[in-house]
Amino acid sequence: MRTQEGRLRLACWLTIAALALFVWSVLDPGVVAVMLAMSLGQVLGTAATALFFWVVWTDLRRARVIDRERR
């Protein structure tokens, strides 16, 4: 994925997957559901957040709001 829109879409899909795991663990509080939500759900949510902030950071640098060199 080379476009910013593609990265943002991936972040959205990762967030939806993480939220689905969290909802599953609330609706069916079994051991497997809770363990998957706490491990895989957290990994997916963290990756989505990092990807989202990467898109924001690169957009701000492209718009020259954040300079590459501090003056």
Image (tube, grey):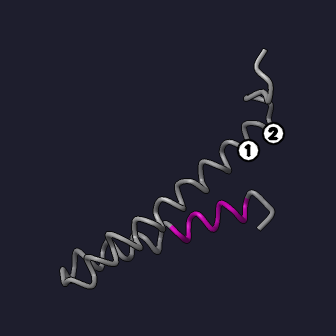
Q: Contact, CB < 8 Å: mark 2 with mark 1? A: yes
> Which residue was labeled with disc 2?
62
Q: Position of residue 45 (x, y in %)?
A: 46, 63
For the C terminus, give its image quadrant. Answer: top right
Q: At 37% from the left edge and 71% from the top edge, which residue is drawn? A: 39
User: How far from the left and from the top, in percent, is residue 25?
Assistant: 26, 77
Reply yes or no: does residue 7 show up in magenta.
yes
Query: Dividing the picture into quarters, in which one does residue 1 lie?
Result: bottom right
Residue 57 among those drawn in magenta: no
Q: Is residue 5 above or below residue 24?
A: above
Provide the residue designation for mark 1: 58
Give the magenta range. Answer: 5-14
**Residue at point 56%, 53% (across, down):** 50
The three-letter amino acid code for the residue at tag 1 is Thr
**Going by the image, does 4 lie left or right of 47?**
right
Element on which disc 2 rests: helix
Disc 2 from disc 1: Cα separation = 6 Å
